[in-house]
Image (cartoon, coloured by chain):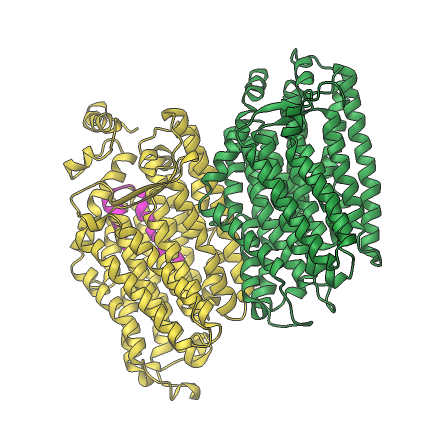
Chain colours: A yellow, B green
Amino acid sequence: MSNDSSLLSLILFTPLVGALVLLFVPKRQEDAIRWIANVTVAIGFLVSLPLWFRYDSANPDFQFVERLPWIPSIGAEYFLGVDGFSVLLILLTTLMGVIAVLSSWTAIQMRVKEYYIFLLLLQTGMIGAFVSLDFLLFFLFWEVMLVPMYFLIGIWGSDNRLYSAIKFFLFTLVGSVIMLLGILAVYFYSHEVTGVYTFDVTQFHQLDIPFNMQWWIFLAFFLGFAVKVPMFPFHTWLPDAHTDAPTAGSVILAAVLLKMGTYGFIRFSLPILPEATVAFVPLVAGLSIVGIVYGALVAMAQRDWKRLVAYSSVSHMGMVMLGMFALTPVGITGSIVQQLNHGISTGALFLIVGIVYERRHTRLISEYGGLSKVMPVYAAVFLIMTMSSIGLPTLNGFIGEILILQGVFVVQKTWAFFAASGIVLGAAYMLWLYQRTMFGTVTNPKNENLPDLTMREFVTFVPLLLLAVWIGLYPKPFLDRLETSVDKVMMRVNSDYTPRFAAVLDTEPGEGAGTRAAAVIEAPVRGGGR
Amino acid sequence: MPAGFTVDDFYYLLPEILLTGGALLVLVVDILLPRREWAALGMTLFTLTLTGAAVIGFTGVDTTISAGLLAIDGFATFFKTVVIVSALLTVLMSPSYLRVEAVRPGEYYFLILCATLGMLFMASGVDLITLFIGLETMAVSFYILAGYLKPNQRSNEASVKYFLLGAFSLGILLYGMSLLYGETGTTTLAGIAEALAGGERSLTLALALILLVAGMGFKIAAVPFHMWAPDVYEGAPTPVTAYLSVGSKAASFAMILRIFIEGLPGLVADWQVLFWALAAVTMTVGNIAALTQSNIKRMLAYSSIAHAGYILIGVVAATERGVAAAMVYLWVYIFMQLGAFAVVAMLRRKDVIGDELKDLSGLYLRKPLAAVAMLIFMLSLGGIPPTAGFMGKLWLFSAAIESGLVWLAVIFVVNSVISLYYYYRVVVFMWLKDEIAGSEIAVSPAMATALVIAVVGSLLFGVYPQVLFDHAQVAADMFGSAVSSTAALQ
């Protein structure tokens, strides 16, 4: 389809264009600025919808590919394309963009113009990271995201914002610059083997890097991605950043930014460094399990509502990582689905905190209680999202968790046990939170006249509620879109793996395709791992 | 006319001749014309533009002139362009600053042009004596420029300090050069490379090497030869500081690359070790010292020390990619460093010196565009995409990785992160603090032009660096033969 040829660029640059338009709007016209920002993200979401309908699940190649020279002298290209993983994450990004921008309408009263400009720039950065198939281009967008997020926390955040903003920035930066060294190592190795300088990720996916080198490069990538996920023990920036960020910042941070790390693993670490991935499984799984249990226990001890949700993220993202590093198709699928679920439910939970924070300007759980009496609609929404977060069947969280548990169980039963314990603890802290804030009588007189959700606020929840039910009841469309992409990753990390789709065998372009397919077909004969 | 000079030599010296003539005219114009301030400024800009055009006119030429004293090649052309662009930006940010300081601009522009002339010779010299004379011409001009604010004690102190330490370091450098001459019997770099091609070593040679490294280390303010830099940077007039930290540094790096890679490829293993240590210590000390500064000029001084350490990685790599990386970095460095100094110069008003961090408070509210510009410069200095600084760092990283300097690369990484902390302090003051002090900030058209050029440069080469990379690679390729012979020796 000819109009597909620039679809990704359109999705990528819509927010940027909106930001540029905002530059020329006088800063006193705050409502005009709000409208422009909202319309921009709405258009951004609409133009991303064709990805859902026109993405061909049976085709294992990267789709909607765009390829132009960028810096020919070092082989960097403007190379965009999507597979099942990125399609879902991009749609999540554009949707959360709409919600984040809409949720800021009344919450942001100061420096409105810059706020929306930063939010839109952030949106472009995130989409850019998900669509880039050139490693340098990916890195560029990856780092571009830091600056607007720094300002969102630093200017519009709460009390401790300067500390949290710089902590977020420096933590992420350390990891990502080390990752850059790893990228360059792959780049030079690829040149050594093929004689061509390129940052083309699809080429990197076919490299057979010596194990010793893979090990070091994996470590470099790991530092970059693990900080972003965040995995224990690199998570310490997260509670601060979340707590001090404005609501929309927390929503974006939880729903999309954290996915950058897990996306990085699945797009780069696993397929480029398959042997090192296998070697690092015990470490990553161990850290994930610690993260799951530790995050849940610390969440239980929080007195700050937002901090509690932040720590629950650490726990949930540990689950996502564990599922991925089970290195089974079900586990990886579950890991991606759970990323979407975490985006939906945690994004919603941050919105929920933001709404009472905007009314009361406190996040202490003890300040609330009995809110279900004064804000019944709010309480209902919160209840559904709580259930989604703890994985109640018929809601989305259940699907992700069951897939992850299933994927992990066949590999290591003890891991599945710990993961399940995380779910139990999750139910405990979430329900306890719900009980303390929503049930009982209104003890604090300040809460007696809190207004319930406004229409605008309710609208921000509608898509999240619908998605939660949709994924919970009928996840097949989501799973379908992931199948071939999961197969491709599986073939890299496990040479014995027989893909569910024959088409996957012919995906790699160029010379590699034949040998790779042959290797896979012979694999059962040869036996053993890579 | 000495033997060996031909008409061709004068043709290829056109940029230098134009610049000398222009510099003299600036003096004349300053004395004769009634509106001398603008006349001198106009004449200076005109001279620089003309010289720049002449330099660019020699793109693609590769020859040696004046009996083998000067090379007109891609490398020289690249560095001459760097020097002239930085001179232009420096001159553009000067008039409003000079007016506030109430000093006569005539000799000021003359001295800037003289310093530029010295740098041009440093960029094209392929003979120790020529290089030394170029360096001396530049240095003497800067001694005077640093003390240009006569009633200002700090400026006087800067001048004297710079003069004393500068003279001392030139002596060391000259001593090293004379030892090298004693060992090889020639002052041309090509001759020296040939004489040392056999790989012989001696104590004298080792001493010469150490003295050369130390002498050049002073010029680029590498630790432990950096002590003069913070005081001089703080005391000198802001535009002079800016030029000192960019132009002088670029020309000195041109000289280092020439001497060591073109002249001493046989000793690569020895000087690599020295520069490795120098690079690691320089970037680390520079960044750590910058962390605690509350004066922007001092902070930028330490940051410029750190950047010298980064660029040294290109020298340590001693490959074509390394040379190209140093060149790319110096090019992008012009825009970010001069841009940052332009903002500092802009803050200078009658009632505010404007070089303390707190003077930046609330800049966003008063001059939003200047605050955005400064943000871009700080991001670029910190190496965050999509700014030019990132592309510079990318080259240095890749040079280090390609040459297997993984540890140096890791030290570089850690340093980049440390540096962001103090660049962000600037951002915090501009964007996150609201107190406003002092009178209105005026932005002259010349200053605005300088800022626009710096912003465009900092962004353009971050998003589309292809042209720059091409030029740097072409220029670095001429070191190909020298480099491959070093590789053989390793």
Q: In this view, does B9 lie to the left or right of B155?
A: left
Relative to the observer, which residue lies in front, A487 or A123?
A123
Judged from this view, the residue extending furthest toward the top is B198
**Residue A525 position within the rendered picture, expressed as x and y whole percent measured from the top left:** 19, 23
- Helix, strand or loop: magenta stretch: helix
Q: Residue at x 53, y 41 (%)?
A: B392
Q: Quadrant of residue A22?
A: bottom left
> In this rendering, would A457 be left or right of B243?
left
Vertical position of residue A489 compared to residue A29: above or below: above
Asked whether A350 or B84 is in front, the reply is B84
Q: Which residue is drawn at 59% across and 23% down?
A: B63
Q: Residue at x 71, y 18 (%)?
A: B4
What residue range appears in magenta? A312-339
Q: Residue at x 65, y 55 (%)?
A: B93
Q: Nearer the viewer, residue A34 or A23?
A: A23
**Residue A364 point in image, percent of width and height:** 46, 75
Left or right of A332 in this view: B151: right
Q: Quadrant of the C terminus of chain A?
A: top left
Any part of residue B211 in sight = yes
Looking at the rendering, which quadrant does residue A269 occupy?
top left
Any magenta on residue B252?
Answer: no
